[in-house]
Image (cartoon, helix red, strand yellow):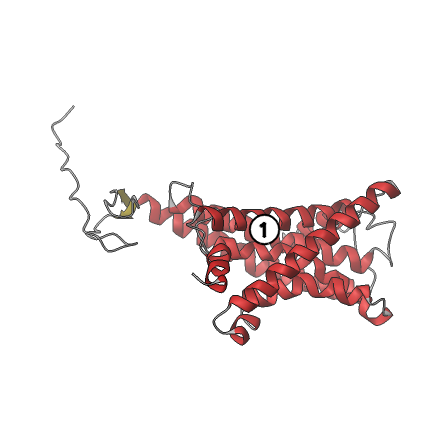
Amino acid sequence: MSLRQRLTTYLEDIDSPIGRTTNLIIASLVALSSIIFVIQTYPVPPLVRQGLNWLDMSILAIFTIEYLLRLWCASSRWQYFFSLYGLIDLLAILPSFLVAIDITFLRFLRIFRWFRILRLVRFLEGRILFNRLSSEDSVALVRVLFTLFAIIFIFSGLIYQTEHNHNPEIFRTFFDAFYFSVVTMTTVGFGDVTPISDTGRSLTVVMILTGVTLIPWQLSTLVKELVKATTSQMLTCSQCGHALHDADAKFCKRCGTALPLPEPTDPEAP
């Protein structure tokens, strides 16, 4: 294989050991980068903060190299550039470079650093995170929980960096913003933590609308998957190993191989 084909295999083929390891490392770096952002909202010693900054810059460099490699390996670079994953990858690295220019009107772009958590969406579409789960309802549960967590996490980061400078006594740390996001998106609205800036209030409106529409939709999706799982039968495909199929299924839903006939149950059996 050529170098381009080999790199494409490493970045996209999660069935190969090297590709799976590469993508798991990238997913771990995304999670580590998000943890660093959270820690930096707390009062930490200057030496620790400096170490976190260097670690974050190193992760940023890896993300930049990965983005350029994906762009170079893509069959259609413009299609990748404007794709969902391409835009998420670009949004994860671009604000840090623009903020480094140190132009005042570009500093607001640092709030978009919180969108790095969305890079994990790439792995929800494949089997890299789900190949150890036994049923589709477990996969649906993981997807629902991750979607809710990602949305709350992003809104928490946005509201923190929007309100911290205007209202530092209320939005002191990331946890204060996280608490406000959960209370707001669930429409509980205790009112003990409130934004005072126009941008913060606008984000609050968006959070309420998101909570009203997203949470019921995700829960209904989960209920549908659970109902579907209860009406399914365990028939293991001899070709691909998929085990969960509809009750009237005669062929595998994944590869199309004919399924073995279920053993008839004896109603007189003890």
Seen as rendered, the residue at the extreme bottom is 78
**Dividing the image into 4 quarters, which one contains the N terminus?**
bottom left
Give the residue type that dot 1 points to: Ile
Q: Is residue 81 visible?
A: yes
Whether 64 is drawn above or below 103: the answer is above
Q: Residues within 10 Å of mark 1 (few under 14, many from 20)?
A: some
Q: Residue at x 71, y 49 (%)?
A: 178
Residue 231 place in picture, x, y as percent: 29, 46
Instruction: Give the image quarter of residue 119.
Output: bottom right
Give the labeled residue for mark 1.
Answer: 26
**Residue 170: x and y, percent?**
84, 50
Residue 201 visible in the current orientation = no
* Quarter of the image with the C terminus in it: top left
- Residue 137 image position (x, y, % from top left): 40, 46
Q: Is disc 1 placed on a helix, strand or loop? A: helix
The residue that appears at 18% across and 51% down in the rendered structure is 258
> Residue shown at 33%/43% (left/top)?
230
Left or right: 104 with respect to 39?
A: right
Residue at 68 percent of width and 49 percent of height: 34
Q: Nearer the viewer, residue 210 or 261?
A: 261
Q: Position of residue 29 (x, y in %)?
A: 63, 48
Residue extending furthest front? Answer: 2
Q: Nearer the viewer, residue 9 or 270?
A: 9
